Amino acid sequence: MIQYFLLKEHSTSIANDQLQVLFNIFSELPQRVLIEWHGGDIAAKPKNVLVRKQLPRQDILGHPNTMLLVSHGSMADVTEAIFHGRPLLSMPIQGEELSNADRIVKIGLGEVLQWPQLTEETLKYVHTYAVLSNFCTPSMSSLGQSSKFF
């Protein structure tokens, strides 16, 4: 199983202590975690974490072993999660991401964790909930053909 963590241009706004919280939780996961990271080099990372500046996003999201997309929740991320039928754990940072986060929860696409609330306990809880709640039901594919989110 794979979990895809997408930060892209927001990588530089993540504090070292927040990154360490993420890595502490990722190190406990049995799955492989793929991180698209546009920040600086990351020296110490868990063995199950692969960090790259660019990853084949559509291939990863379309892979049957991908179980969760963790991202800042841009409209592109939401659209791709819907298209591929993947639950979304949104960690919004700015702008549209904040309003998208409300809709993600309201429609049942996934869960939201605000950066100021990020602790190992909150991330572990929200992550587990997002994975186990099976947000991607058969109705999710029909959502992609409607305008319910947009």
Image: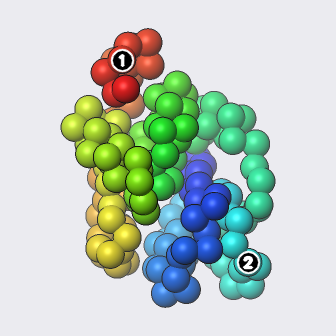
Decide: is 20 above or below 91: below
Q: Residue at x 61, y 69 (%)?
A: 11
Q: Say what amino acid the circle numbered 2 marks.
A: Gly
Closer to the camera in the image, 96 or 102: 96
The residue where tag 2 is placed is 40
* Element type at mark 1: loop
The residue where tag 1 is placed is 147
Closer to the camera in the image, 29 or 103: 103
Disc number for residue 111: none
**Badge 2 local density, few (<14 within 10 Å), some, or many (20+)?**
few
* Element type at mark 2: loop
**Badge 1 local density, few (<14 within 10 Å), some, or many (20+)?**
few
Q: Residue at x 51, y 64 (%)?
A: 29
Determine if residue 84 is in view. Answer: yes
Closer to the camera in the image, 31 or 91: 91
Left or right: residue 53 versus residue 141 is: right
Tell me the quarter of the image containing the C terminus: top left
Q: Residue at x 54, y 61 (%)?
A: 30
Quarter-of-image position of residue 46: bottom right
Upstream in sequence: badge 2 or badge 1? 2
Decide: is 28 above or below 95: below
Quarter-of-image position of residue 149: top left
